Image (spheres, grey):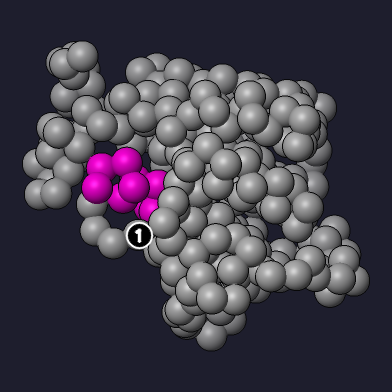
Amino acid sequence: MPLSPEETRRYARHLVLRGVGGEGQQKLKAARVLVVGAGGLGSPVIAYLAAAGVGTLGIVDHDRVSLSNLQRQIVHTTAAAGTPKAESAGAFVASLNPHVRSVAHNERFTDANSSALVAAYDLVIDGTDNFATRLAVAEAAETFEKPLVSGAVSMFDGQVTVFMSGGPRFRDLYPTDPDEADLPACEIVGVLGAVTGVVGTLMAMEAIKLITGLGEPLVGRLLLYDGRAARFTELAYDGQA
């Protein structure tokens, strides 16, 4: 479907951008992306993908907005406190870009519903905050051969990587389940809000690259961000773990 005159004006900076252009914008418009988690990482992902013109954004989150979320979860507002996060994020999408369709999945991502959720989308983005859910998302994406952008944050630091069919798997990077005591929740140790913005925006960038075919995705590479030192480090990993 061709871009409307309003879309042409909206995406003008993409349309003149070498490597994106009209073809890339059409790919974005046709894309169906599932974002698991509408929290600190999911918020910038949702914001930038909606702004970029991704045609359909599925948003999975079983939680409701609370005041303690607002220090970092930028798609939610004070007025949205108490409402389902998936619906609050969908309202943000509608207010930012009426050309993007959002689908609210007000449920926890589990093994039971993973197939129905993942199968309906082209690309999966995981911004959840616990290992069990991240593993479930990765296994479902692998089963349906869907590219997965995965990110995580803690305190002042974060990381991003991409899993694709034919590349290293989630279990190659995480061969064993970590002890939960080694993964304290942000409710306990805290997280600097801007760190989620940095990492979430990197995740959105990887998604846009995958959709448009632009550049080299972070497959087999783990990008680490140290917020206090303002330093990025890249670690390579393969399928031999």
Q: Is residue 79 above or below residue 204?
A: above
Q: Residue at x 66, y 69 (%)?
A: 174
Q: Is residue 182 above or below residue 122?
A: below
Q: Magenta residues?
A: 201-213
- Image position of 29 (left or right of 189): left
Q: Quadrant of residue 20?
A: top left
Q: Is residue 111 above or below residue 113?
A: below
Q: How many C-alpha atoms fall within 10 Å of the one at disc 1: few (<14), some, or many (≥20)?
A: some
Residue 21 at x, y percent in the picture: 13, 39
- Towards the viewer: 146 or 227: 146
Q: Quadrant of residue 53?
A: top left
Q: Residue at x 69, y 70 (%)?
A: 175
Q: Residue at x 40, y 47 (%)?
A: 207
The local secondary structure at tag 1 comes to loop
Residue 137 located within the stretch drawn in magenta: no
Query: Residue type at mark 1?
Result: Pro
- Towards the viewer: 28 or 80: 28
Judge whether residue 197 can be spotted in this image: no
- Image position of 122 (left or right of 152): left
Residue at numbered disc 1: 217
Residue 240 at x, y percent in the picture: 54, 76
Residue 210 located within the stretch drawn in magenta: yes
Report the number of numbered marks. Answer: 1
- Towards the viewer: 92 or 183: 183
Predominant secondary structure in magenta? Answer: helix
Q: Is residue 44 above or below residue 168?
A: above
- Towards the viewer: 189 or 95: 189
Q: Quadrant of the C terminus?
A: bottom right
Residue 104 at x, y percent in the picture: 63, 22
